[in-house]
Image (tube, helix red, strand yellow):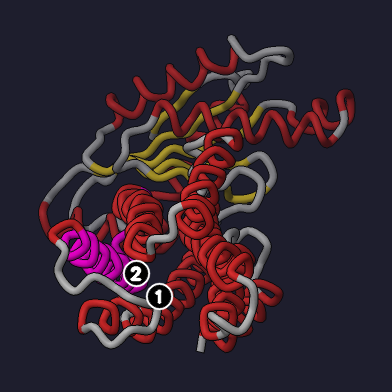
Amino acid sequence: MALAMSGILLIIAQTYPKTIRGLREWSLAALAIALCFPLFIARDHIPDLLSIILANLTLLLAFMAMNIGTRKFAGTPPKYSRVLLALFVLLFVALFVWFTYVQPDIRMRVGTMVLFTLIVVLDQLLLVLRALPRTMGRHILVSSLAIMIVSRLIRLGALLIGFAPPTGVFDASAAQLVYIAIPALTIPLGTISLIMLASEKLRHDLEFISRHDGLTKCLNKNAAMEELEREIAHTRRHGNKLAIMLFDLDNFKDINDTHGHLEGDRILVEFARKVKASLRASDQLTRFGGDEFMAILPDADLEQARLVANRFQEAGRESQPIAWSVSIGISAWQDPDDTLDALLTRADKALYKSKALGRNQTQSI
C-alpha cells in the first residue's frame, strides 16, 4: 500500500507544475515507509543492524521527509538548522544502538520510536494548522495526523504505566497490534489528503493565472470587468458610492526606448506594487494592457479618489533610480440610471484631459 501511494505521489510530482513544491518529499516518505516494512518483517532472519536500527531509522526519516515536504508545500522556511536535525537523528540512532546491543530492551526501543515520531508529527500538525488554508485536503491531513498523535500518546502512556509491555515487534498484545495496524489507516488517508492538497493548489494557481496579469499580478481586464459589474450591482442594490481611476504612465515608450524593456517591466511592477500599497483591502487594481491600469474603489467618491491619486503622484516622484509620472482620470457612480459604459467613458475622457493638459496630473468628470 505504501509503495503504491509512493508511486502515485511520484507521478503527480512529475506531472504537476514545479511551483507546487514538496511532492517529491512526500513521495520519498511513502517509499521509505514501504522499504522499512520488509526489514521489520525479516526480524530474527537478518542482522539486528538492519531489522532494528536501519528499519526504525528509515521510518523516522520517512516522517521527517513528510514534514519537510509539507513545509515546502506551504512555502514556509526551514524551522530547524541542519545541525539540529542531524543531532536529532544521531540521538535517535544512539538510543537504538544502546537498547539493542548494550542494554537490550524492546520496551525502550518502542518508547524511543514513539517519542521521536510524536515530536515530528506534532511539529507537522502545528505547521498544517498555521500555514495551510482551510480546505478539505487540509482537514483530512489534520485527521490523519491527529490519529497518529493520539495513538502514540496512548502507546506512550501504556509503556509508562507498564500496561501490556511488548515482547516483540509483532507480539499479540492488543496495544502493540493496534499501534502496528494504525498505518493501514493513516497511510491511505494521509496520501489522499496530500493528493487533494496538491490538486487544490493546482486549481488555485490556474484560477489565479486566468484572472491576473503575469507581470504585475494585478487583475487582468476580463476579471476586472467582472469585479466592476459586481460592484455596480452592489452599489445599485445598497445605494453605496463607487469610483474608478484610469492610469496611464507618462512617456512610457520613451522609458522602454531609452532604458530597455526590462527596465520598463521593472517600473510597471514597481508602479503596481506602490499603487496596491496605497489602496484599501477592498480596492481592486487591474492592468488593462501595456502601461494602462484601472483601480476600482468601492465606497469612495471623487474627492476620496483624488486623495488616493495624489499619493500615487508622490510615489512616482520618489521612485528610484528612474522617476516616473502618471496621468489619472477619475469618475464616480452618479445615480441608479448610470451605466458601466458611461462610468468608463467618463474616466477615459478625464484621463485624456489629463494628458492634454500636460500629463502628470489628475482630472475627474
Identify the residue shown where x is 59% and y is 25%. 326
Q: Examine the image and state in which quarter residue 42 appears.
A: bottom right
Circle 1 packing at 10 Å, graded few (<14), some (14-19), many (20+), is many
Residue 210 visible in the picture: no
Three-letter amino acid code at the position of disc 1: Gly
Q: Which mark is residue 141?
A: 2
Three-letter amino acid code at the position of disc 2: Leu
Q: Which residue is mark 1?
A: 190
Identify the residue shown where x is 62% and y is 20%. 325
Tell me which segment is drawn in magenta.
131-159
In-front residue for pair 327/197: 197
Q: Examine the image and state in which quarter residue 276 appears.
A: top left
Q: Position of residue 187 (x, y in %)?
A: 42, 79
Is residue 143 within the magenta segment?
yes
Query: Is residue 188 rendered to the left or right of residue 85?
Result: left
User: Does the magenta stretch mainly form a helix, a strand or a loop?
Assistant: helix
Residue 314 visible in the picture: yes
